[in-house]
């Protein structure tokens, strides 16, 4: 068993601050836990019973030592509650806020001291906790009607911010992909990103790791863990707290120094680690690598039915340092013979607004062997695009086995075509530049191209 | 009457290449025209009648001189057709592709020569044409079921690419805003962006101009027109054809040289003209300036219920060169007295996942006079956010009269809250960085901050 297994797969859970009231955080979290878990022990001296489950006055009265204890009580009470945990829990998730992030450094030091003394592993404080659909574990104090949970999948989420974790979970769901594990670790007095990365590197259900970071306690250990992880699976990092304002905000957020971003950035680059530009870029890349396996080679072919959209994709391709070699002469001549004279047979191949599915088929068949990856643009505002394109692309992707990403904007068959493609493991993006950034994520996971 | 009025408000229209067949471009365009316009003259020697309307063998047989003639016939036929236009049309929109963009320079020169000789104003070739909902004019060969048209509004679209114009029209519709006029001018052998800018600068129904450009024929005239326009209303430009690949693609697209992007960029910057980063950035900025009037001053206050989202917004704020001054001491002390100790009273103000509407109200009331603009982040995954926030923000925006932009990500009341806010003229964005970029568009239209 691995060190963090009892945290992600707890057999028993205590919830300190459990409440029968639906509107209270301790009420929402209890409902979410009871929905799927059996050995849940609510703790609250005010009740003998909450939501039909026996309630304990303190963790000391619980008949077993739990794998995970969750504390949802005001910050000032946390040291006292923690002191009662001796021999009663392995991992303690401190949801409560009001520590170093608002200047209460003494209070934070006190819980660190107690944790060490009692050999407790601490998560937080000032965090949301854990979502592990593979174990049906959900400690988040977010009503499911407010935040629909994503399904099981291959994306792990490691976030210093609870808010950003919420947004990532939702974006993962909207991208028609799923989550293997999600954890928000807040002020990180004990458990930090590095240790989570090490765990996820050898976690079979995780194929991609998406991480939002503001600060790292031990830079060297962080980089080692990040390298260890990214040698095994794609690791996508969004580092916040870049400018002075952001750094100050990050400090007020988790009470830790974000450090000089230029130093972080250059270390990341030296280590071949990829940084996302912003929130959308993080999720666009995550979508691509959760759908398809990254591959080597950076020669891109663009096939479009909209000239301008092809130009925007080509610009982004150059900005990302990818190559867009010209079509080989024999292929060019072959396609020129079969296509109308107003099609542009180059890279991008511009099939114009009059493109038919057959034209995409003939182009891809011709170029399939000569490029490493393909960006297909299919604007559905014009008459020629039907669901048949989706069926053909699914077959093409299966036979060619190289990265294939699609940009579809609007109208007509777009919603059905997008569904068909994404079910077939072909990610679709709403802008040409975002599609190219998605494709870039598939071409070299050790890039550090951004910025 | 202004020079381009007959183009945007034609009283009579000839459609050369009109077809009774729904699947043909000349059939789609005819249907779209007949739906709203009376004096439409289909031209096609094969028919005496199409869709119940008398059809003419050539433009020469039409009983009047039309304001606008639209040619939808193969490129090789265009010179002959154009030669028949003597005295029969003022503006000729050449939809046909297959000219300089595929190397047919002689053919393109020929139509330029005929146009000059017959004193015809030419639009295109290789273009989609015009959409003017204020005149119910729609020359686009795009079935309405494939591309839903946006409603009337204050955004003019000037695009060298038909594909990008389609995507902009759809994005404008999705942003709950509307279009004043849209034009795609393709290879631009005669009518170019500069002349359209001059027209739109004094067009009352246009309050914002969104432009996608690949090349400009006369750089000096373009810059003069762009300056003239942007002194009167926000002008947002996305220049494509930046790298070598994109430049080659732009040349294959409209047969014109995109030129050295660095030169274009530095001239734009010197002229205080704003360039969008990419397609999303163009539309995000357009949404903001179509909702609210830009204002001077660049001091931003961020109010959030998610710490990490606030940090990302603060980073983007710094990147854009905007200021995020600290809260004045008296306001800070005042808010500290009324808020729980785990709220962060700084800039960003972090009301945490426990924020209530009342907390937003008290914060905005306190800071309203001290900042130039406001970014409100309301993550609806947590329990405290209700529609009441939308109602309060509507009132706040009315009374404060300064730019206000909102970031809402997901879940719960999000869809209804977004609708309420956008109806009240408050633009909502799905990521913190995009929200900040939207706000930046409102703070200084003569920025050139990007890139």
Image (spheres, coloured by chain):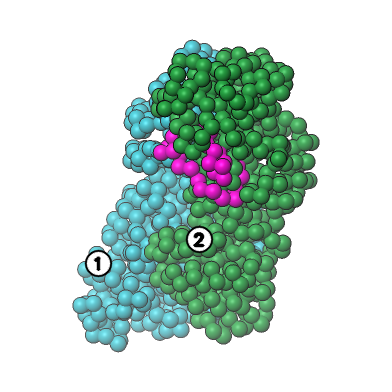
Chain colours: A cyan, B green
Instruction: State yes or no: residue B132 in magenta.
Output: yes
Tally of numbered tags: 2
Question: Where residue A205 sits in the image (x, y, percent)?
Answer: 33, 50
Which residue carries the number 2 mark? B423
| Other residues around mark 1 within 10 Å, as few (<14) / some (14–19) / many (≥20) | few
The correct choice, above or below, for B387 with respect to A314 in the image is below
Residue that sits furthest to the bottom in the current view? A46
B55, above or below A10, in the image: above
- Of tags 2 and 1, which is closer to the observer? 2
Q: Quadrant of residue A47?
A: bottom left
Q: Where is residue A450 drawn, in percent x and y? A: 58, 45
The residue that appears at 24% across and 64% down in the rendered structure is A36
Closest to the observer, B225 or B296: B225
Q: Is residue A83 magenta?
A: no
What are the residue bounds of the magenta stretch? B131-157
B176 or B312: nearer the viewer: B176
Q: Secondary structure at mark 1?
A: helix
* Residue A192 appears in the figure: no
Picture layout, residue B320 above or below residue B68: below
Check chain identity for marks 2 and 1: say if they share one.
no
How far across and how far down the image is residue A398, in percent? 34, 30
| Observer-nearest of A263 and A379 | A379
Residue depicted at x 56% and y 18% = B61
Q: Residue at x 72, y 30 (%)?
A: B217
């Amino acid at each position: 068993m691995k060190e963090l297994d009892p945290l992600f797969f707890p057999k028993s859970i205590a919830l300190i601050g459990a409440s029968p009231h639906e509107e209270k955080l301790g009420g929402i979290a209890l409902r979410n836990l009871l929905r799927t878990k059996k050995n849940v022990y609510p703790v609250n001296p005010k009740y003998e019973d909450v939501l039909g489950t026996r309630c304990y006055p303190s963790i000391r009265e619980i008949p077993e030592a739990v794998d995970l204890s969750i504390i949802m009580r005001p910050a000032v009470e946390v040291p006292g509650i923690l002191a009662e945990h001796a021999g009663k829990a392995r991992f303690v998730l401190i949801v409560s806020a009001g520590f170093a992030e608002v200047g209460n450094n003494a209070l934070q030091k006190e819980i660190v001291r107690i944790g060490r003394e009692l050999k407790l592993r601490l998560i937080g404080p000032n965090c949301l906790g854990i979502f592990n659909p593979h174990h049906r574990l959900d400690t988040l104090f977010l009503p499911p009607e407010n935040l629909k949970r994503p399904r099981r999948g291959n994306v792990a989420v490691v976030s210093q911010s609870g808010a950003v974790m919420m947004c990532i979970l939702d974006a993962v769901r909207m991208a028609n992909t799923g989550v293997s594990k999600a954890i928000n670790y807040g002020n990180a007095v004990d458990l930090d990103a590095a240790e989570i990365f090490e765990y996820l590197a050898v976690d079979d259900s995780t194929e991609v790791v998406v991480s939002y970071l503001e600060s790292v306690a031990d830079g060297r250990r962080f980089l080692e863990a990040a390298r260890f992880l990214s040698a095994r699976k794609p690791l996508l990092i969004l580092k916040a707290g870049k400018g002075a304002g952001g750094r100050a905000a990050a400090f007020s957020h988790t009470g830790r120094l974000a450090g000089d971003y230029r130093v972080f950035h250059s270390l990341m680059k030296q280590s071949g680690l990829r940084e996302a530009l912003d929130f959308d870029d993080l999720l666009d890349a995550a979508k691509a690598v959760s759908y398809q396996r990254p591959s080597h080679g950076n020669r891109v072919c663009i096939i479009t039915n909209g000239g301008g959209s092809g130009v925007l994709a080509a610009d982004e391709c150059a900005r990302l340092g990818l190559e867009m070699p010209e079509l080989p002469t024999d292929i060019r001549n072959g396609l020129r013979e079969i296509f109308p004279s107003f099609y542009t047979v180059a890279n991008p191949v511009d099939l114009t607004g009059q493109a038919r599915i057959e034209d995409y088929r003939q182009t891809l068949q011709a170029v399939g062997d000569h490029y490493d990856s393909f960006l297909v643009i299919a604007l559905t505002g014009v008459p020629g695009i039907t669901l048949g394109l989706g069926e053909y692309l699914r077959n093409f992707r299966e036979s060619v086995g190289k990265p294939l990403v699609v940009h579809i904007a609007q109208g007509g068959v777009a919603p059905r075509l997008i569904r068909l493609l994404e079910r077939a493991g072909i990610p679709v993006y709403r802008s040409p530049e975002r599609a190219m950034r998605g494709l870039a994520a598939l071409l070299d996971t050790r890039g550090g191209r951004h910025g």
